[in-house]
Image (tube, rainbow, N blue to C red):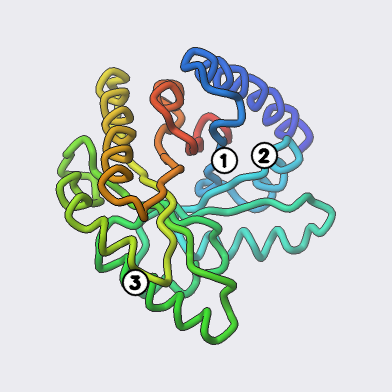
Amino acid sequence: MDNYLDLMRARREQILERFYAALDRAGRPHDAARLIAVSKTVGVDETVAAIQAGYRHFAENRPQELVRKLTGLAEHPELPEVRFDMIGNLQTNKINAVLGSAELIHSVGSLHLAQAISSRAIRKIEAGELAGPQRVLIEVNVSGEESKGGFSPDEIRAAAGELAELEGICVQGLMTMAPRGNKDVARRTFAGLRELRDELEAAHPDLNLPELSCGMSEDFEPALEEGSTLVRLGRVVF
């Protein structure tokens, strides 16, 4: 794994150079956004190497992989503390596996899912198994692609007030994915997410949405230039 770790460290330096350059172009401070290493395609050993290379924030897209990584990393008490988020489609029968394990759920794409997470979080809070409401992001299909899930912009406008009132969750911001293969379209998608966030905050003073989760390996630079606070990088990291 020594060669892998060396490669990981070299790649991280290159990624951070691009990451900070994009923030500089946008006139944003270097701590305005965070880099998430998406470890969904690698094992525990590769995740350990990523931690040794300097990554502290990870994400998984399957609850069972989240549990497997956390269990595996528990066997390495010498490692610094890291954070895991949940970024994939979450089925209601997998919610309990994620509550208390994922710091942030990025992919709440329906009112039904938000209500289910909220009700189960409330039960866990009442049982003393969860410290407080689950932090979530609302997934919005800004581009309108039929293949993508999430609220449409009009649907989130209609549901925002109800989402804000759910006691078991704390809505922290919005998430989207851009169409692949066209950075100009991606940029418009990311700008659209930022503008929608600003609109929702203005319309609902009780909503505070500081987080914008957008940008992946092929388009994280325009995402940062358009206001992303969380970029999700898999292939370019691993």
**Mark closer to the chain start, 1 or 2:** 1
Identify the residue position indicated by label 1 in the image: 37
Indicate which disc, 3 or 1, sits on the residue closer to the N terminus: 1
Disc 1 + disc 2, Cβ < 8 Å: yes
Residue in front for this viewpoint, 35 or 123 = 123
What amino acid type is highlighted by mark number 2?
Answer: Tyr
Crowding near pointer 3: few (<14 within 10 Å), some, many (20+)? some
Query: Which residue position holds label 3?
Result: 92
Residue 32, image x and y in percent? 55, 31
Give the Cα separation between the discs numbered 3 and 1: 25 Å
Report which quarter residue 131 is drawn in: bottom right
Q: CA distance from mark 1 to mark 2?
A: 7 Å
- Of 203 and 54, which appears nearest the observer? 203
Mark 3 vs 1: CB contact within 8 A = no
Q: Quadrant of the N terminus?
A: top right
Q: Is the residue 49 above or below the residue 82 in the image?
A: above
From the top left corner, tell me how far across and down residue 25 is, in percent. 49, 13
Q: Amino acid at mark 1?
A: Ala
* The disc label shown at residue 223, or none: none
Which residue matches tag 2?
55
Task: Write the residue at 31% across / 71% down.
Answer: 115
Amino acid found under the numbered disc labelled 3: Thr
Name the element at disc 2. loop
User: In terms of depth relative to the viewer, which is nearer, 38 or 112?
Assistant: 112
Q: Secondary structure at mark 3?
A: helix
**Left or right relative to 22: residue 7:** right
